[in-house]
Amino acid sequence: MVMKWRIGDFAVELVIRDWFKLDAGFLFRGAGKRYWPSFFKGTDIAVDENNMVRIPVNAYLITAPDGRTVLVDTGLGDVRTRWSESTLHEFEPENEFNLLPERGIVPDYVIPTHLHWDHAGGLARVLGGRILPVFQKTEHIFHKNEYEHARAAHPYNRSSYRRETIEGIKAVMKNRKIRVHFAHSKKWKLSEVGGPAGIELIRTRGHTPGHMSVLVGKPRSKTKGFITGALLPTRCHCHPAIGVGNDTHGLLGSDLRLKYLLKAANEKWIVFPEHDVSPAGRISIDGKGAFRFDLVPDEN
């Protein structure tokens, strides 16, 4: 399964997809249960008898015009070896596919949008009883605020930064062969550390203190791609009132989501949400002023 979209001279591919279950009230905080059917209309979202929703985790590979590659998020990692029995029982995680190994791809850069277990779990793996980085020849980029918050283990969202995830991050940091860069501002270009031009990291604080979304496309490009991370987890979150239960800065996140939904609609960006079955779409505004997510098929 290869899904690819062209963003000017760049390509964006869906290369990793995992799945897990999450409580619908948690995933769609701010929307009462009686409103769910209207939000889910026209989507593949279904709520089971326990109010649980099975959702994907999408990870995207950007290929720059010079051939270098950037992996945005890493998925869950190997659920058979990485996660505790309590995690397996609570979230029922499963791997669907990871195209990187079978195609022999080692990304030049890996950028977790944030360090929650479902986005950064694939940073590490277990080999011979040891926790080792998956990408030992790859430059890693974290936002400074996100790294500090993940290590602080605040009780509000400690469960999202699971012990196994933190162990994986530590394994990356301890490996002297791996170059780690810390983004430290609201907007940060990958070219600042020698990466390809046309890839910008934007701190979209709200879900976490150092959450980043990734904007793809050179300044004068007619088409841009926007990998949202948890800024826009699913198309249902196009409604600014809907958040996620573990958002650390809910009001700020809603304001930023509104800002970038408007930009995406006005500039016709291709948007890549990370928890939606449909991994790419354009934002439009209907006659009532509500945002719509219009599917963009891949080039295959």
Image: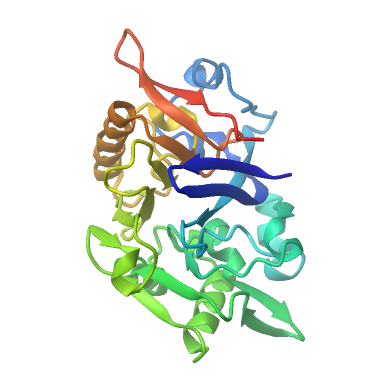
Q: Quadrant of the N terminus?
A: top right
Name the foreground residue: 96 vs 93.
96
Is residue 198 positioned above or below 149 on the image?
above
The residue that appears at 38% across and 66% down in the rendered structure is 154
Residue 88, horizontal then vertical, whole percent: 71, 57
Is residue 56 positioned above or below 137 on the image?
above
Q: Quadrant of the C terminus?
A: top right
Count how many numbered circles sit on residues in the image.
0
The image quarter in which residue 201 lies: bottom left
Colouring scheme, one of rainbow, by chain, secondary structure, one colour:
rainbow
The residue that appears at 29% across and 49% down in the rendered structure is 249
Residue 194, horizontal then vertical, whole percent: 35, 73
Name the foreground residue: 212 vs 254.
212
Residue 284, horizontal then vertical, whole percent: 37, 21
Q: Residue furthest bottom?
A: 176
Residue 204, horizontal then vertical, whole percent: 30, 50
The image quarter in which residue 146 lies: bottom left
Is residue 52 positioned above or below 136 on the image?
above
Is residue 39 positioned above or below 63 on the image?
above
The residue that appears at 56% across and 80% down in the rendered structure is 137
